[in-house]
Structures are given as C-alpha cells and as structure tokens.
Image (cartoon, rainbow, N blue to C red):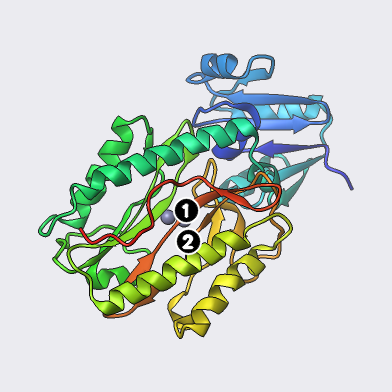
Amino acid sequence: MQLDGILVTERVNYRYLTGFTGSRGYLLVLKGEACLFTDFRYTQQAGEQVPGLEIREIGNRWVEEIHEYLGEKKVEELGLEKDYLSYQLFDLLRDKWADIKLRPEEKLTAALRSLKDPEEVSVIQESVDLADRAFTYILGELKPGVRERDIALKLEFFLREAGASERSFDFIVASGKRGAMPHGVASEKALEEGDLVTLDFGGVFQGYCSDITRTLSLGKAGDREREIYRLVKEGQERGLAAVRPGVTGEEADKVVRDFFVEAGYGKCFGHGLGHGVGLEVHEAPRLAPTAVDRLEAGMIVTVEPGIYIPDFGGVRIEDMVLVTGDGCRVLTGSSKEFMEL
Ligand code: ZN
Ligand code: ZN
C-alpha cells in the first residue's frame, strides 16, 4: 500500500527539505502539498524562511491539532522517520491517532541528503576552509605543558570567532599514549615533548559541518612514529584514489584495510574509512566494511584511516572530499606532511 504522506519530525531533515531552522517543527508532506506545523516562538521565522509554504501554529494540543488536519486531508497511512523518532513520541501518536496507520520508514531523507547540490558544496567548502584556518592557528599554540582541553577550547573559540555557530562534535585532542584511542576526547593531560598529537575537529557553518584530523609530533619524533605516520599517509592517499562514483563504501574501505594488513597493522585500524558529512557530521553514505551503497558524484565524504597502538599512541589523517564524475576532489587544504613542532 502507498503512503498518503510523511511526517518529518527531525530538525535536520525538515531544515534540509524547507530551510526552516527552528528547533521545533512537524513537516507534513502530502501528495502535491506540504504544511509546516510550529509553535508561537517560530511562526514569524518560518514564514520568512519558507515563503510559499503553508505554516500552521500549534499549541499545547498539538497532537490533536495535527490529527484534525490529517482528518481533513483524509490521510489514512502516514510514514514516520523510524531512525529519528523517539519511541515515546511514536507511542503517543499511535495512541492518539489510532485511526491512522503509522508506518515507521527507514532513511526517508538520507539518500536525498547524501547528494549535495552546488550551493551546499560551496557552503561546505567554506566550513572546511574555516577548519583549515583553525588548524594553521592552533599550530602556534601546541607547546609542552598545555592541556588537551585548552587546545580544544582554543580551537572552538577560533572557529566561532571566525563564523562557525558551534563545534560540529566533541573535539578529539589525543596526545602521547592517549592517541591509541580513536575517539580520545580532549582531557586534562598536558602535552609533552615527543608526543604524537591527534587533533580531530570541525565547525558548523550555515548549518553545515566540517570534520578534519591531523596528527603531528611535538618535538623530534622517533623512528616508529615516523614509520606509522608514513603508512597512514600512504593509506590515506590510496583511500583518496579509491573514492569515485560506482565504488561501494566497502570497496573503498578495503583498499586501505588491505594495505594496512600487508604492512602488518591490520588489527590497528578498527574503524571505518569514512562517512558522509553535511547537516550532520556523520550521515550517509558510510565507507566501511558491510557498506554496500555505491558512491555517486555529488556526495561529500571523509577519508580518515588511522593506526592505533595500545600503550604507544596513534596517527589518523582525515580529509573531506567531494565525489566527482571520475574520482574525487579534496576539499581540505591543510598540509599532510609530517610536522615536528
Ligand atoms: Zn573527524
Ligand atoms: Zn570523521
């Protein structure tokens, strides 16, 4: 049976579909028409951001109010966002809208959102440029004795001062042995001479995220540190060469994974090669084992292999790239040469 409409309740998804940025909205999409329900705080903003779309103000009785509207439109079967909707809200709607067949559907907007139009590409490029500038700036702040959390704070302050509305995720600043944790969120640890330091950060610019990782050495690096860096850099370059339309996320991932296995570090790369980036810092498509979807021109993904060694440390290098007609274009501009500060 076909759906009569879908109700979009997730903020990034109704933002993507309409441009409305308020924190509360219910976008009802029917055949040939749509209506955005929001409350008193946002009706003026919604009218300005989405001229031409029907806007209805809802109050405390919003569940009943939308239900009445669905009745007027004779909606019998309604799709919901299975991967975003809370069980609590689903339970409530099932109870109050008992005469409507609710159909939780997966990935209602994921495929649309994974393909970026030229306007989105240019906003994302600006977001990436901000992250590049932040990286250049932070190089001057990395010194023995400075705590990881201070580096994270300085990065965030720089990004926000430069135009980002917020950070795109909890920044990773992992130095020395902490570098062995792929998601080593900035801690109280102070940087020390000889540490490898992994910085993974990004900002949100006009709604769109950036995500960059660089690893460098504080002071002179040892032979093992150099060797691991060389392998990750080559792995990352092989990953970039593998990203093109028609390749599955799994195939791109395997190119780098096989290279690390051959070099004897197969067990040290425990996460996927990359992920889509857009309104959310992690979105479709995935580049990882079991990711069967094929890459298409217009997608923006990260390529971020790493090698992590317990009790030693780790190296990760992450760029954002745009899949083009015959390969990919790297959006990230920061140097990947090994740095010894
Ligand atoms: Zn990252
Ligand atoms: Zn990432």
Name the amino acid type tagged 2.
Answer: Glu
Mark 1 = which residue? 319
Q: Pick whichever, 52 or 137, lies toward us.
A: 137
Compared to residue 286, the image places residue 88 above or below, namely above
Which residue is drawn at the image coordinates 47% and 83% (left, top)?
A: 263
Q: Position of residue 120 (x, y in %)?
A: 58, 34
**Crowd rating for badge 1 (residues with CA inside 10 Å; few <14, some 14–19, many 20+):** many
Q: Which residue is mark 2?
A: 304
Q: Determine which quarter of the picture holds residue 220.
A: bottom left
The Cα atoms of the two marked residues, 2 and 1, are separated by: 7 Å
| Sequence-first tag of 2 and 1 | 2
Q: Which mark is residue 247?
A: none
x 31%, y 73%: residue: 226
- Residue lying at 55% horizontally and 71% vertically, measured from the top left: 256
The yes-or-no answer for disc 2 within 8 Å of ligand 2 is yes
The residue at the point 70 percent across, 61 percent down is 247
